[in-house]
Image: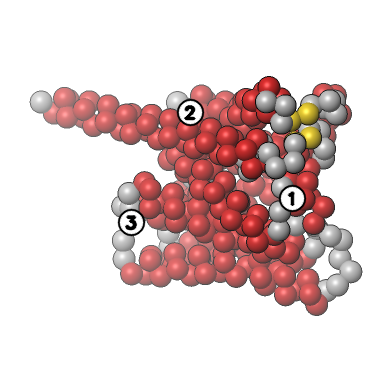
Amino acid sequence: MGKKAVRNLGVFISIVIISGWLGVLIDSVLTGQPEGDTLGMGLWLVLPLLTALVIILFSRLSWRELGLKPNFKGNIKWYLASILIFPVVTAIVLLIGTAANWIDLSAFNLKPFILAFGSTLFINFIIDIFEETAWRGYLTSQLLKLNLNDWKLYLIVGCVWTAWHIPYYLVFLPEVDLQAVMPVSRAVYVVVAFTTFLSWTVMFTELFRVTKSVWPCVILHTVEDSLINLIVISGYISIAAGKEILVSPINGIIASILYLAVGLVIRAYRINSCKIRSDQILFSKV
């Protein structure tokens, strides 16, 4: 990979890191905007993908590298997995929390929940096209060219993903929503979120690598945004004070361990599949 490509990655990462702070600056000037839906937040959301598209355009990279082709053939199981991973893990966490008397489900009403969940899917799908095309389609695909080992790849993507979110957690996220997720300071929550993003990064990265498409990742992210945020922030469950760090469906240790395990299973499948294909090629040449 040439110096130009490394420079392009540096430019992308730098703009990603400052994009939210540019949004914060804009919102400090344009006061009176609705909380949680500002022009600055819009800039923060779209700037990473726009940067990637400009870099691809002027660097004459192949658009195929973004993984925009669905690649349905042979990957239907992964599309199904992208739909089920967050609901299944969330159900496990809720069962564990309920059994330990750390989670109260008495306020959970299935019909309103299903309606609320369905009503958010489309807008989250559009938002997550921007995110996943940037993080997986561009950042991950370009880092793969560096032949980094998997753990360095996960760490870099996880750190960039977290750094992009820092202005959101410190400024954009309404205080009432933050406290509903975890009653800690904004600075502490950034640290908690970092561990969550690292565990998720393995899963999202491996899903992208095994399918060579961003679309399963977009679906996975859409279900996450529409499911676990709704359950916690909208009050469908109540978590005992001090137990959020363990059983929160969003940032809890148990959930993070399960998502990391899912990612490692997909990784093992990818590595084994590559080995089988290599053996088949070698055998065919004998």
Residue 21: where, in percent of width, then height?
66, 70
Question: Is there CB contact under 8 Å for labels 1 and 3?
Answer: no
Name the disc covering residue 183, or none: 1
Depth check, front residue: 129 or 205: 205
Check disc 2 and report its element: helix, strand or loop. loop
Residue 188: where, in percent of width, then height?
64, 57
Going 64% across and 25% down the picture, which residue do you hit?
Answer: 96
Which quarter of the picture shows residue 281? top left
Q: What kind of residue is marked 2?
A: Asn
Query: In the current view of this chain or complex, which residue is farthest to the left?
Result: 286
Q: What kind of residue is marked 1?
A: Pro
Quadrant in which the N terminus appears: bottom left
Residue 155: where, in percent of width, then height?
44, 53
Going 62% across and 32% down the picture, which residue do you hit?
Answer: 86
Name the disc covering residue 75, or none: 2
Check disc 1 and report its element: helix, strand or loop. loop
Question: Is there CB contact under 8 Å for labels 2 and 1?
Answer: no
Check disc 3 and report its element: helix, strand or loop. loop
10 Å neighbourhood of mark 1: few (<14), some, or many (≥20)? some
Looking at the image, residue 56 lies above or below residue 194:
below
Q: What kind of residue is marked 3?
A: Leu
Name the disc covering residue 146, or none: 3
Going 84% across and 25% down the picture, which residue do you hit?
Answer: 106
